[in-house]
Image (spheres, grey):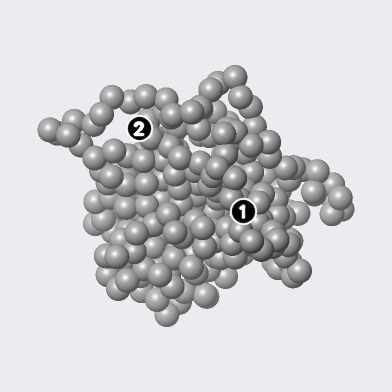
Amino acid sequence: MDVEHVLIVSGLPRPLHPRWTTDDRRPTIPTFMSALFFKRFLKRPFQIASITPSSKALVKRVARKMDFSQPRVIAEYGPGEGVHSREIVRRMPSGSQLLLFELDPDFSRDLRRQFADDPRVHVINGDAARLPEELERRGIPHCDYILSGIPFSILEINKKRALLAKTYDALADGGHFIIYQVTNELRQHATLFERAESEYVLQNLPPMFITVFHKVKRRNGHHRPVRRPAEFSANHSA
């Protein structure tokens, strides 16, 4: 598979109601491609969403969606090389925990090496659907944030909805599910979440949507009625 073909497979998104994200700087185009990341993309193109790791601009913008003013429990689906993981670890205070779910054994091995000296980080070489079991096994009631870079758009519909349901249940009331994706099609499926906000980040190759799904806090012991995310129309496609 040559680079030209890989670029076609990766594709570029068409924005859905984005809040265009531009800085005074030009979009950051990576000048160095991780050999491991590119090698794993070529081997498993449908498990890895992009041919390059996330840009610094995207990583920082994703991290700003999280409040690190107190200890947090955070899970990440598909951390890959760990570019988002490293930023989270840098920001999160002592007493926090970060659970990394990575299917690829080479990435998992590299993540364990990176975070070998940090007891707050747990690397799980397995499916993100194991999150509820891992939380129970570790005596953790809920996550404050769940971050995902896995390409939801290529998941079979029942698997996609099952993972969304497990994600919703694993979040604490008031928790947030944050995704960065080439397309924004997940909004039509994530109907369990009461609110969703998206922005479109140009400073990445390819450009990405960041969407934050909110699990609204209970009122008098009950959640607000579930509704479709604001601004989403099934007539739009990504």
Between 19 and 232, the one lying in front of the other is: 19
Mark earlier in primary sequence (1, 2) = 1
Q: Amino acid at mark 1?
A: Thr
Q: Quadrant of residue 230?
A: top left
Please state which of the two labelled residues, at mark 1 or mark 2, is closer to the viewer.
Answer: 1
> Please, is residue 188 above or below residue 49 in the view?
above
Looking at this rendering, what residue extends furthest in the left direction? 220
Residue visible at 59% across and 45% down in the picture: 20
Q: What residue is disc 2 on?
A: 194
Using the image, determine if residue 27 lies above or below residue 207: below
Q: Position of residue 55 (x, y in %)?
A: 63, 62
Image position of 74 with respect to 36: above or below: above
Q: Secondary structure at mark 2?
A: loop
Give 72 or 111, whichever is nearer the viewer. 72
Classed neighbour count for the residue bearing mark 2: other residues with Cα under 10 Å, few (<14), some (14–19), many (≥20)? some
Residue 100's spot in the image, x, y percent? Answer: 46, 59
Q: Real-space Cα distance between discs 1 and 2?
A: 28 Å
According to the picture, the residue beneath numbered tag 1 turns out to be 22
Q: Secondary structure at mark 1?
A: loop
Q: Is residue 64 visible?
A: yes
Q: Image point 46% across, 60% down: which residue?
A: 63
Toward the viewer: 223 or 61? 61
| Residue in the foreground of this view, choosing between 11 and 195 | 195
